[in-house]
Image: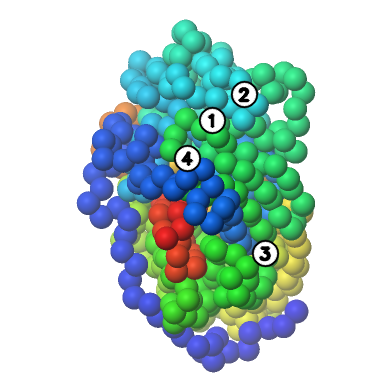
Amino acid sequence: MRKIKNLSMVVVLFFGVIGLFLAGCERQINGETEPTTELAADGQTETPELSGDEGSNGPRTLTVGLEGDAVSLDPHASNVGGTVQILVQMYEPLVRLDVDGNVVGVLAESWERVDDYAYLFHLRQDVQFHNGAHMSAEDVAFSIRRGATSPAVSAIMSVFDPDNIEVVDTYTVRIGTHEPFAPLLNSLTHPAGSILSLAAYEAGVDLDETPIGTGPFVMTNRVHGAQIEFEVFEDYHGQRPAFDYLVIRPIVEPSSRIIALETGEIDIANITRTDVTRVANNPALDLHQRANLQMLYIGINTERVSDVRVRQAINYAIDNNEIHQTLLYGVGQTLTGPISDMVPGARTDLTGYPFNPDRARELLAEAGYADGLELTLIVNEFPDRQEWALAAQSYLANVGITLHITQIETPIFLEETANGHYDLFVLAWTTATGDPDYGLHPLFHSDNRGGPGNRTFFSHPRVDELLDIGRSSFDTEVRLEAYSEAQEIIVDEAAMVYLATGSTLVGTQTNIRGLNLMPIGIQLFYTVYFE
């Protein structure tokens, strides 16, 4: 595997500061915001009706190129970004974050907090599943109970108490938690809160092969690693998409994906930061970009790299500002802490670890590694993350750390990092609920070590205590104070090298309209239409 000899030789492209999606947003930290009235039922902008049964040129197909395939089509079996992007086309939750970060109703018409342990949800009465079954409170209760006991989504769903979920009547359900839990409403916006068909489950349907949701698209065919085909769900409770078929093509190689977009093979493509100017300068294409709630990082296994001085040395040795300007092309913002300033309660005043290789060498010598040491790093197949790994390898070599890099496919990568088999790894985390609890608790609470999210195996009693306070208190000031102290300790303990915030980058054909870039970094394609 090649090494980056000199990062300064990489061409720097800087596109300015991306406007924060939270501008003008008055979202509250405790998740009490009510649905807006200016948007459609799920917070999306209205799209025009299709002209005629099949449109003026017959049935229309929207073809989308994504950077990876779904690990599973079962919403409770995976929490990987690429998987989520596909799942949200078929499944829907009770509530969702809209384009402005507000909690709005999708399958729930309204809700109220019963007490510190539970909410009461009043459901839409016109919702059908793809198998024709009518959605009721029984389906909702089943779905939340199942998610609460599913290991792959335990970081978000384990807070819900299966014994505290009650069907009140056909269209009313009470959803409760084990302990007082302030961000309950925000947590249900996560795709792991998708509502499944109880009838399909009881009939033995394999949800990984035959997903059955309430969303606007029904899967009709799947060729693993190559293509997933959908048709519009004619009995969808919302507005019918302005096209007839959706095709999603997983194209891992960015160069192949951008070529497919340029040649018109696909209508929409997730692009990398290196392709921003290429799309922007192409008159046949439109560029869409927006800062999102993702955090890009290099994780350090604190059980294998147990000396905090070594972890701090790694942080001082890596110049995240140069990585941001070169390999990340200036898109997004550099970070000095674990959550973006778009998340309420983020500490933007933390100094972090300025690039200081001399200080890194001093810390290594204090820890007994004056003559250097060898570490391992694992990275998945995404080319941009491999570049970050190579950059880290070059920086660490400069202070005497030999970094051995292993690149493997995502499913195995997730298994290996969940089991703690490597010293370092490259990954990203999205605060998908918009609440600081989800930006911190899954990654740093000792209860979530391993697969649930804490792949650095970070453990700190005071941080556990603070994160528990943050999620259990309904006092906004108390929550903010707890998260503030927790972030300071987390940065001092140096379990991660923070690279930058995420940014959703999408290229489209110029006749594509209605594409909404969501704050969690995904797109809902049913709002798209052809001009």
Q: CA distance from mark 1 to mark 3?
A: 31 Å
Disc 3 element: loop
Q: Which mark is residue 240?
A: 4
The amino acid type found where label 1 is placed reads Asp
Q: CA distance from mark 2 to mark 4?
A: 17 Å
Give the class, few, some or many, for how many residues have Cα within 10 Å of label 4's Cα (few <14, many ≥20): many
Q: Are marks 4 and 1 in contact (CB under 8 Å)?
A: no
Of mark 2 and mark 3, the one earlier in the sequence is 2
The amino acid type found where label 4 is placed reads Arg
Dot 3 corresponds to which residue? 251
Name the spot of residue 132 as percent of width and height, x first: 62, 24
Dot 1 corresponds to which residue? 235
Q: Are marks 1 and 2 in contact (CB under 8 Å)?
A: yes
Name the spot of residue 137 as percent of width and height, x first: 51, 16
Query: Does residue 123 appear in this view?
Result: yes
Q: Are marks 3 and 4 in contact (CB under 8 Å)?
A: no
Q: Are marks 2 and 3 in contact (CB under 8 Å)?
A: no
Of mark 1 and mark 3, the one earlier in the sequence is 1
Is 257 on the left or on the right of 225, as rendered? Answer: left
Q: CA distance from mark 1 to mark 2?
A: 8 Å
Q: Along the line of sight, which residue is nearer the eye, 305 or 116?
A: 116
Query: Does residue 355 appear in this view?
Result: no
The amino acid type found where label 2 is placed reads Gly
Dot 2 corresponds to which residue? 132
Give the class, few, some or many, for how many residues have Cα within 10 Å of label 1's Cα (few <14, many ≥20): some
Of mark 3 and mark 4, the one earlier in the sequence is 4
Q: CA distance from mark 4 to mark 1?
A: 9 Å
